[in-house]
Image: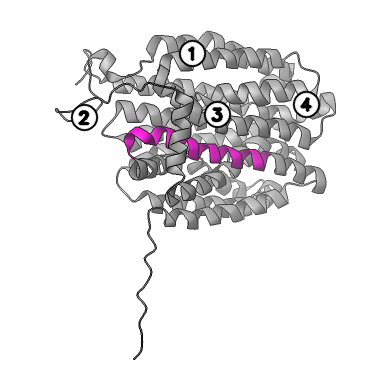
């Protein structure tokens, strides 16, 4: 069925969710701009700042399964609106902080948990409810919102922080969350197609909507983790996504700007690199969704992780050269930043079914954020101990190659060969 304007409302939901996730990605990307200013103003070490960011990334991931269950239980509009209001409050209060514990509490704990409700698992919930056809493309488009958020926000926030200080950048985040994105969520988001008298996009004529979920969402999240953890595929997907988080948000998203300053480049130059990576990632994520609808997602993940690992092995040299090699890194790395999301969601749906896939993927995403937190912290330690990010880049490159191998094992069953006896 279609809306009265001839466009199925699933695409309106997709566009609204894209904008919500885009803005949230921008909010989450700003700490990369704050690393050096916080070191300069308060004398905080790279490890201390990286630790606060690591807490945020960790809670962002660990809170995602419970947030996904809350989304399923109480609806998209209500959950997203409350979460965005909390994001605005925590970012605004960050402007007043003077002590490390305040940074850890406001950005690490509050911001981490609030943004979990509008993280990538939101894409899985929206797509499983509103789409039957074009699911891979829809997930790819929503995944690209995180790249687009970087593209829009990072250069702007870096410029604001350079001109007026990091507090002005934090205040900009608070204002955008409160006065722009929260009203948008209230106006456009709807929980289910049935509320508008519609079936999901591409649903057959005899489609029967699933009954609304009742009960305790936290209990549902725990129960689905218990079910999923009994399957080998869950651990393989979680392990690969741990590597994904370690080699993207945790390392590059958090530390690339500081790495650029270590090589004599400006913070704006580093933010510009992340923005260009984001631009390529919009293309890569959307293309990955299209490919996921047509090809084996295991092989897609193999190539994504493999190219990412190879690009990270050469990143330190590329930053020193700042020429063609850096262009090659930006292109290869940018194309697969979140290209891993559509194949991973598809494999979760294949292994656990559409009704469970949203929360199960959120648990897999939790592993992603554990990896991101691990890399954010250890890369900061690398810079503090060795005065260089080179060890962190090399280790991340090796992890990417390991992720390529792990991806091919998902869905495969090891069948023991019969023993041949010689008589």
In the drawing, does residue 46 fall left or right of residue 150? right
Sequence-first tag of 2 and 1:
1
Q: Residue at x 60, y 42 (%)?
A: 371
Pick the front one: 107 or 285: 107
The CA distance from mark 3 to mark 2 is 31 Å
Q: Which mark is residue 302?
A: none
Q: In the rendered image, which residue does mark 4 sit on?
A: 38
Sequence-first tag of 4 and 3:
4
Q: Secondary structure at mark 4?
A: helix
Residue 134 covered by magenta stretch? no
Q: In the rendered image, which residue does mark 1 sit on?
A: 81
Q: CB of mark 4 within 8 Å of CB of mark 3?
A: no
Q: Secondary structure at mark 3?
A: helix
Q: Which mark is residue 203?
A: 2
Residue 371 covered by magenta stretch? yes
Pick the front one: 89 or 95: 89
């Amino acid at each position: 069925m279609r809306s009265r304007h001839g466009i199925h409302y699933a695409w309106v939901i997709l566009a609204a969710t894209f904008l919500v996730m885009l803005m949230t990605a921008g909010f989450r990307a700003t700490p990369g701009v704050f690393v050096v200013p916080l070191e300069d103003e308060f004398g905080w070490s790279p490890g201390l700042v990286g630790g606060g960011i690591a807490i945020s990334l960790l809670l962002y991931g660990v809170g995602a399964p419970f947030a996904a269950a809350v989304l399923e239980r109480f609806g998209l509009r209500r959950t997203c609106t409350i979460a965005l209001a909390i994001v605005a409050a925590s970012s605004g209060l960050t402007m007043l902080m003077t002590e490390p514990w305040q940074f850890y509490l406001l950005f690490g704990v509050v911001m981490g948990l609030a943004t979990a409700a509008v993280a990538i698992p939101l894409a899985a919930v929206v797509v499983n409810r509103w789409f039957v056809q074009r699911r891979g493309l829809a997930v790819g488009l929503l995944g690209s919102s995180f790249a687009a958020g970087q593209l829009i926000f990072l250069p702007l926030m870096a410029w604001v922080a350079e001109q007026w200080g990091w507090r002005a950048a934090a205040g900009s985040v608070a204002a955008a969350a409160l006065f722009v994105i929260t009203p948008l969520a209230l106006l456009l988001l709807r929980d289910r197609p049935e509320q508008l008298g519609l079936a999901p996009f591409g649903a057959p004529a005899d489609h029967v909507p699933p009954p609304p979920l009742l009960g305790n969402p936290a209990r549902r999240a725990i129960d689905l983790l218990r079910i999923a953890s009994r399957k080998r595929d869950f651990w393989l997907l979680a392990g690969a996504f741990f590597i994904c988080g370690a080699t993207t948000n945790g390392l590059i998203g958090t530390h690339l700007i500081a790495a650029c300053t270590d090589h004599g480049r400006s913070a704006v130059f580093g933010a510009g690199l992340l923005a260009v990576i984001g631009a390529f990632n919009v293309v890569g994520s959307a293309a990955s969704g299209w490919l996921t609808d047509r090809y084996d997602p295991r092989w897609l993940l193999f190539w994504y992780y493999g190219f990412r690992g190879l690009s990270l092995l050469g990143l330190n040299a590329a930053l020193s050269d700042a020429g063609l090699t850096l262009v090659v890194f930006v292109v290869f790395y940018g194309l697969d930043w979140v290209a891993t999301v559509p194949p991973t969601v598809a494999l979760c749906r294949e292994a656990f079914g559409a009704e469970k896939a949203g929360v199960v993927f959120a648990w897999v995403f939790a592993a992603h954020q554990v990896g991101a937190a691990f890399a954010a912290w250890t890369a900061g330690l690398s810079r503090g101990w060795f005065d260089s990010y080179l060890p962190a880049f090399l280790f991340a490159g090796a992890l990417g190659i390991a992720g390529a191998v792990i991806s091919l094992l998902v869905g495969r069953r090891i069948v023991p060969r019969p023993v041949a006896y010689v008589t």
